[in-house]
Image: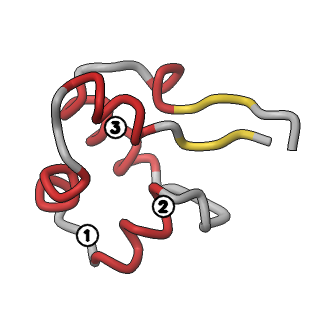
């Protein structure tokens, strides 16, 4: 299973979930579902925005688990 690993990146970069939420400009409910892997899809523009904000690649945003 592929999971969004943005919480670890935020910690590494010294940023908070609130900071990312404000930067992305999406509803808090959708943001919360996305970062806690409770959604079935993530828009490409959100992936791109997170990569730019966190100065990372899509490979660093996601991890593969055995679930």
Label 1: how many Cα within 10 Å (few below 14, some 14–19, many 20+): few
Q: Nearer the viewer, residue 63 or 40?
A: 63
Q: Residue at x 26, y 42 (%)?
A: 49
Q: From the image, tell me which residue sits under label 2.
A: 34
Q: From the image, tell me which residue sits under label 1.
A: 26
Q: Nearer the viewer, residue 63 or 44?
A: 63
Counting from the top left corner in percent of width and height, residue 58 is at 47, 26
Left of 63 or right of it: where is 49? left
Which callout, 1 or 3, points to the residue nearer the camera?
A: 1
Q: Residue at x 40, y 68 (%)?
A: 32
Q: Residue at x 20, y 50 (%)?
A: 20
Residue placed farthest to the right in the image? 66
Q: Secondary structure at mark 3?
A: helix
Q: Are marks 2 and 1 in contact (CB under 8 Å)?
A: yes
Left of 61 or right of it: where is 66? right
Lower position in the chain sequence, tag 2 or tag 1:
1
Counting from the top left corner in percent of width and height, residue 60 is at 47, 21
- Above or below 33: residue 29: below
Q: Residue at x 71, y 39 (%)?
A: 2
Left of 38 or right of it: where is 14? left
- Above or below 17: residue 12: above
Counting from the top left corner in percent of width and height, residue 65 is at 78, 34
The residues tagged by marks 1 and 3 sit, at their Cα atoms, a distance apart of 14 Å
* Quarter containing the C terminus: top right
* Quarter containing the N terminus: top right
């Amino acid at each position: 299973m592929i999971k969004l690993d943005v919480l670890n990146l935020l910690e590494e970069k010294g940023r908070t979930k609130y900071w990312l939420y404000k930067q992305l400009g999406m509803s808090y409910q959708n943001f919360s579902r996305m970062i806690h892997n409770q959604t079935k899809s993530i828009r490409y523009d959100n992936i791109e925005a997170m990569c730019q904000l966190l100065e990372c690649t899509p490979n660093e945003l996601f991890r593969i688990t055995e679930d």
